[in-house]
Image: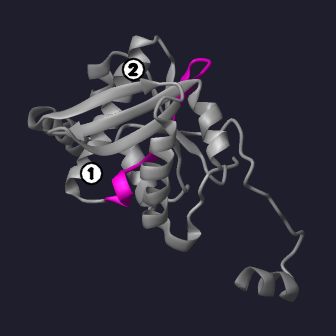
């Protein structure tokens, strides 16, 4: 059995309530609480507002969250992928809190990258992520798709991203394309290999 370096988590698409029922109790409660508190989801299709999303939401969010180890995707790559999907925006009382870029390829709704205004990361923003995921579930169902991919996560239980996505009922699946992983092996562990791994 081989486990990919960064497996993706995906949900089987079906009726919205059935998909939500697959999530754990805390996730279901948070989604319903956000509905009651007035969070709103708005959709822009294609590349409309992409520049604003990339500059004011995505880049500050990634740099704030990951610091010097942040991976900032080239804008032309994300813009090209957004042509097959769009951006979901979450607001509370008219204030923008969160945005998620997605694409639709074949039978799969694929969540790509996200962002928050200026890299903001407070409780209201964290709740807005639940609103965005729930809206994506509805969109995937309305379009008759088979899968909703929540993106990749590190394949160990202590990883917070993996735990968050698993809480939605996601299952691990190999990524269809991985251009950043390189598998290297040795027939035996020598002192030189041990020193390399230690470094």
Q: Is residue 66 visible?
A: yes
Query: In the visual, does 76 lie left or right of 138?
Result: right
- Residue for point 38% across, 59% down: 119
Q: Which image quadrant for residue 33? A: top left
The spot of residue 43 in percent (x, y) is: 37, 26
Query: Within the magenta stretch, is there residue 135?
Result: no
Instruction: Name which of mark 1 and mark 2 comes first in the sequence.
Output: 1
Residue wearing tag 1:
125
Q: Which image quadrant for residue 137? A: top left
- Up-down: is 177 above or below 73? above
Residue range in magenta is 103-120
The spot of residue 82 in percent (x, y) is: 56, 31
User: Local crowd at mark 1 within 10 Å, few (<14), some, or many (≥20)?
Assistant: many
Of the pair 56 and 113, the residue shown nearer to us: 56
The spot of residue 22 in percent (x, y) is: 32, 31
- Residue for point 57% across, 69% down: 69
For marks 1 and 2, give the one nearer the viewer: 1
Point out the residue furthest to the right here: 187
Residue wearing tag 2:
139
Of the pair 76 and 69, the residue shown nearer to us: 76
Look at the numbered disc 2 and give the secondary structure of its residue: helix
Of the pair 109 and 38, the residue shown nearer to us: 38
């Amino acid at each position: 059995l081989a486990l990919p370096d960064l497996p993706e988590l995906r949900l089987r698409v079906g009726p919205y309530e059935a998909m939500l029922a697959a999530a754990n109790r805390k996730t279901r409660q948070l989604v319903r609480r956000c509905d009651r508190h007035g969070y709103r989801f708005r959709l822009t299709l294609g590349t409309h507002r992409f520049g604003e999303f990339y500059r004011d939401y995505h880049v500050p969010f990634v740099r704030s969250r990951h610091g010097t180890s942040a991976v900032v995707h080239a804008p032309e790559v994300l813009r090209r992928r957004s042509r097959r999907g769009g951006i979901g925006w979450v607001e509370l009382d008219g204030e923008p809190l969160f945005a998620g870029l997605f694409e639709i390829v074949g039978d799969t709704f694929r969540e790509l990258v996200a962002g928050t205004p200026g890299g903001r990361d407070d409780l209201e923003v964290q709740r807005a992520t639940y609103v965005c995921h729930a809206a994506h579930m509805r969109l995937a169902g309305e379009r008759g798709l088979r899968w909703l991919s929540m993106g990749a996560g590190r394949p160990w239980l202590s990883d917070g991203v993996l735990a968050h996505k698993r809480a939605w009922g996601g299952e691990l699946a190999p990524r269809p394309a991985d251009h950043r992983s390189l598998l290297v092996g040795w027939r035996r562990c020598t002192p030189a290999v041990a020193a390399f791994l230690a470094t």
